[in-house]
Image (tube, grey):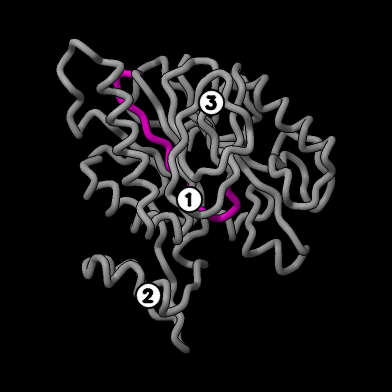
Amino acid sequence: MVAGSGFPSGWIIPDWPVADRVGAVFTTREGGVSLPPFDAFNLGDHVGDDEAAVTANRRMLGERVGRRPVFLRQVHGRRVAVLEACTPDGLEADACLSDSPLVACTVMVADCLPVLLADVRGHAVAAAHAGWRGLADGVLEAGIAALRTLVDRDRAGAAAGGESDIVAWLGPCIGPQAFEVGEDVRQRFVLADAAAEPAFRPAGQGKYLADLPWLARRRLQAAGVSGIWGNDGGAPWCTFSQPSRFFSHRRDARLLGSSGRMAACVWLR
């Protein structure tokens, strides 16, 4: 995980092989104005934080990335939105993509897995909010298909982009040592793909510890994305186990009643 200039030192800059015109960042709790328990850089406007603080944090994010981050209304589905300069906030979708340098594709998370996608040549970018429901329903596959369509359109007159042209970066999420799920979740994945079984480690009493990054990597690979970077399921990527750095809905909502939201952004310069 790499920090970059121009952002708070704790923010994460994806280390992945994309064109220089592709920019990306993952925010942490650092750098904002929200008060406890949302301290300090909460971007969620639906979690009970002060509205003025959220507005200020979102404005700061836009200033730091140098264009407008478009905030979706995420519902744990698979809808993909194409963002343009005039696209308003609040569009219901769990993935977005764009070839405009005026907006940043943005998804908010607080345990769910953020997945950033890019054409390595920098024609277009995408972001997906991949909790277990969206992942099981195919949000990554929908995002990849839409991104390939947009890239091929923008490369009119050139050879169509092959599967290896799309790369992915996985951001922090709840780790496999903390993500306890029931038999119903395991069945959703295993019935669709028997080879997904290793992602679920028995935890007793009908519960399992699920490896969300592993499941995402398998789905990305099946969709033809061979270049996958970022979260490998290791402890440094776990949102649940690092309360001073990351928000975590599963950890914070039980103790504090709610949790802030972080953002993963990707854009074209």
The residues tagged by marks 1 and 3 sit, at their Cα atoms, a distance apart of 18 Å
3 or 2: tag closer to the N-terminus? 3
Q: Nearer the viewer, residue 152 or 238?
A: 152
Q: Residue at x 76, y 41 (%)?
A: 40
Q: Amino acid at mark 3?
A: Ala
Membership of 114 in magenta stretch: yes
Image x and y of residue 174, in percent: 52, 58
Q: Position of residue 34 (x, y in %)?
A: 81, 41
Q: Is residue 50 left or right of residue 149?
A: right
Q: Which residue is mark 3?
A: 104
Across and down, in percent, residue 257 comes to: 77, 64
* Label 2 SS: strand
Neighbour tally class for label 2: few under 14, some 14-19, many 20 plus, Cα within 10 Å: some
Looking at this view, name the residue that lies furthest to the left.
Answer: 159
Q: Is residue 131 above or below residue 155?
A: below
- In this figure, which residue is indicated by the disc labeled 1? 113
**Mark 2 residue type:** Arg
Badge 1: how crowded within 10 Å, few (<14), some, or many (20+)? many
Instruction: Please provide the residue range marked out in magenta.
Output: 109-122
Residue at (72%, 39%) from the top-left corner?
41
**Which residue is situated farthest in the top direction here?**
157
**Magenta run includes residue 118:** yes
Percent position of residue 24, x then y: 49, 28
Regarding residue 236, the answer to whether it shows in the image is: no
In the image, what residue type sits under mark 1?
Leu
Q: Is residue 220 left or right of residue 135?
A: left
Taking 114 as reference, is 216 left or right?
left
Residue under label 2, please give it: 201
Look at discs 3 and 2 and give the one toward the viewer: 3
Pointer 3 with pointer 2, Cβ within 8 A: no
Query: In the figure, residue 103 lies in which quadrant?
Result: top right
